[in-house]
Amino acid sequence: MPDAARPPRHVLILGGTTEARRLAAALAPEPAGAPEAAPAPECALRVTTSLAGRVAAPRLPAGEVRIGGFGGPEGLARWLREHAVDALIDATHPFADTISHNAALAAATAHVPLLAVRRPGWVPGPGDTWHQVTSLDEAAAALPALGTRVFLTTGRMGLAHFAHLTGLWFLVRSVDAPEPPHPPRMEVLLDRGPFTVEGERALLRAHRIDVLVTKDSGAAATAAKLTAAREAGVPVVVVRRPPVPDGVPVAEGPEAAAEWLRGLFSAADSH
């Protein structure tokens, strides 16, 4: 039973992903009711999710929400201390490496336990033609040899890496409209997943796509394009995800994260 005299444990989730919303739904005092949510630890919790604010209309999670940056690792460490955070969960996008490194530095400075939640990456299967690269610059360098009509699904923030490819045509899909610099020959498709294989097939056909570029973000919500590309014989340039900072434990989903919190708080209560 929770100790009535003790304030609730405070969990800060660095969010913006499906996994972050599911975890918040499981942990918040009045869950949003996601049927697949993980069971919450058996103690009183205060849950705050922090969103970067890069999307105009984000999907808000259960519990408390803050929007905007912290001002680097020092600002995040200060926030952790000032708001008496007991555990920090980095459930950001697998490619949000700046905030992940800031979280690792801040957690060490503020002496707050940190866990990273990372969905499993995609794995090529029979029939896939993947060209794996380590950066958007490498992806751009690979494109001229692979095709001329590019389906670019790496997000609006990295279009400058492709702006010099004046001989290629790009279909760019993003949640919000991109800003310059970007490729001169470009059509923008504003859309948000999950996407279907049927829809992705139609998109490849309608725009005569002959090469796909994606980040290895993992998860099923945006994996349909890989199936459609395989069926159409379209090569895929896959940008590998950056590694989690050294020393940070990793959970593959909300269920494992909730179990980690349960063990963390149980151990603290036993001392």
Image (cartoon, helix red, strand yellow):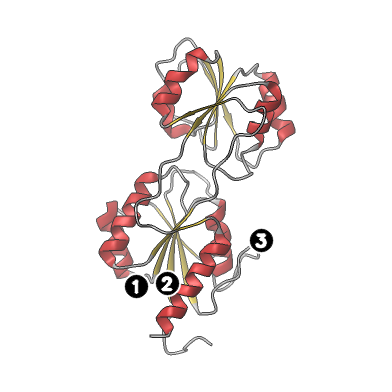
At numbered mark 3, what does the secondary structure look like: helix, strand or loop? loop
- Give left or right: position of 91 versus 231: left
Q: Nearer the viewer, mark 1 or mark 3?
A: 3
Q: Can the viewer see residue 261 in this picture?
A: yes
- Would you say 203 lies left or right of 11 here? right
Q: Amino acid at mark 1?
A: Ala
Pick out the residue farthest to the right: 198
The numbered mark, 1 or 2, whose residue comes first in the sequence reads: 2
Q: Give yes or no for contact between labels 3 and 2 (Cβ–Cβ under 8 Å).
A: no
Cβ–Cβ under 8 Å for marks 1 and 2: yes
Determine which quarter of the picture holds residue 128: top right
Q: Nearer the viewer, mark 3 or mark 2?
A: 3
Alpha carbon of mark 1 to alpha carbon of mark 2: how far?
A: 7 Å
Q: Position of residue 183 (x, y in %)?
A: 45, 19
Q: Quadrant location of residue 36?
A: bottom right
**Along the viewing direction, whichever of 16 and 244 lies nearer the viewer:** 244
The residue carrying pointer 3 sits among few (fewer than 14), some (14 to 19) or many (20 or more) residues within 10 Å by Cα, namely few
| Nearer-N-terminus badge (1/3) | 3
Say which residue label 3 marks.
Answer: 36
Q: Amino acid at mark 2?
A: His
Whether 218 is drawn above or below 253: the answer is above
Residue 10's label in the rendered image is: 2
C-alpha distance separating marks 3 and 2: 23 Å
Q: Is residue 185 above or below residue 119?
A: above
| Number of residues whose C-alpha sits closer than 10 Å to that of mark 1, classed few (under 14), some (14–19) or many (20 or more) | some
The residue at the point 44 percent across, 12 percent down is: 166
Residue 182 in view of the camera: no
- Determine which residue is flagged by label 1: 84
Question: Residue drawn at (71%, 31%), measured in percent from left and top?
Answer: 199
Q: Earlier in the sequence, mark 3 or mark 2?
A: 2
**Residue 91 position within the rendered picture, expressed as x and y whole percent measured from the top left:** 47, 55
Extreme residue toward the top, this view: 167
